């Protein structure tokens, strides 16, 4: 007997797909912003750091509303994307990926920044004296030493994206097969008569995925430190 029904499996698959896309697309930006706030010396760096972490302290519904204002059909960017490229984000799974990316982005930036701040600058200086350029130093020295933080940030952000609810339902609604991710499926089950068993199953899956992601993140960070001599 199948433990999850077809609708629940579809919600699980959609959650995994949305989380994977959100993390994949935001990872390069996370590395760039982590570098800027950790190594940058410019006016407004503290403000930029606060803005990056803003989704952590705002209600997710506020973030979803902000996305509607920016990327809705009549939004500042949404209208331009639709008219120029035919890209529609609101009420689509691409929009769900954007919402989860915004909410999980600070977690990824924070993990990468902490790892970057622990990189021995002396190794980079030694490589510079040997003639290595900025790109060579970053690829051969800094990036490998940042790897534990990058992997930990990716896994943590992926796990957080799987559980995002408020921003997703506000921005892209709760459409079966399109935007109904695992948390939204659980919410729907709770609203239906006799949906307690389905809600319990979905909650168990969510707890398992979240706990597994956190344990994997910690294991990766600890396992890679000795390999990198840290």
Image (spheres, grey):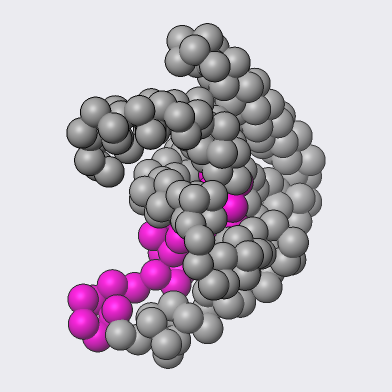
Q: Is residue 67 visible?
A: yes
In x, y percent, where is residue 39? 49, 50
Q: Nearer the viewer, residue 95 or 62?
A: 62
Residue at horizontal 46 percent and vertical 15 percent from the top: 228
| The one of 229 and 30 positioned closer to us in this rendering | 229
Residue placed at 50% from the left, 31% from the top? Answer: 119
The residue lying toward the viewer, choosing from 88 and 140, is 140
Q: Residue at x 28, y 32 (%)?
A: 129
The residue nearer to you, when weighing 93 against 128, is 128
* Image x and y of residue 147, in percent: 44, 28
**Which secondary structure is most common in the magenta stretch?**
helix
Quadrant housing residue 43: bottom right
Residue 88 horizontal/vertical position (percent): 34, 73
The image position of residue 222, as x and y in percent, is: 59, 15
Would residue 180 be seen by someone viewing this image from the given angle?
no
In-image side of 19 versus 170 (left or right): left
Q: Is residue 66 above or below residue 60?
A: below
Please say whether residue 89 is one of the residues in the magenta stretch: yes
Quarter occupied by the N terminus: top right
Q: Which residues are magenta?
A: 81-109
Quarter holding residue 221: top right
Image quadrant for the C terminus? top right
């Amino acid at each position: 007997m199948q433990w999850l029904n077809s609708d629940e499996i579809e919600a699980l698959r959609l959650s995994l797909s949305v989380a994977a896309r959100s993390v994949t697309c935001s990872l390069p930006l996370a590395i760039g912003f982590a570098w800027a706030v950790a190594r940058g010396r410019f006016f407004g760096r503290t403000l930029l750091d606060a803005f990056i972490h803003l989704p952590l302290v705002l209600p997710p519904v506020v973030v979803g509303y902000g996305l509607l204002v920016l990327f809705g059909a009549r939004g500042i960017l949404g209208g331009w994307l639709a008219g120029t490229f035919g890209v529609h984000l609101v009420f689509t799974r691409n929009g769900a990926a954007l919402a989860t990316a915004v909410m999980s982005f600070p977690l990824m930036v924070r993990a990468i920044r902490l790892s970057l701040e622990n990189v021995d600058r002396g190794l980079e200086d030694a490589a510079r004296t040997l003639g290595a350029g900025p790109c060579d130093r970053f690829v051969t020295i800094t990036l490998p030493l940042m790897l534990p933080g990058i992997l930990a940030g990716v896994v943590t952000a992926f796990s957080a994206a799987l559980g995002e609810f408020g921003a997703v339902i506000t921005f892209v609604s709760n459409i079966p097969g399109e935007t109904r991710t695992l948390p939204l499926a659980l919410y729907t089950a709770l609203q239906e008569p006799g949906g307690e068993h389905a809600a319990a199953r979905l909650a168990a899956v969510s707890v398992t995925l979240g706990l597994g992601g956190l344990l994997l993140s910690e294991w990766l960070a600890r396992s890679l430190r000795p390999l990198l001599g840290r």
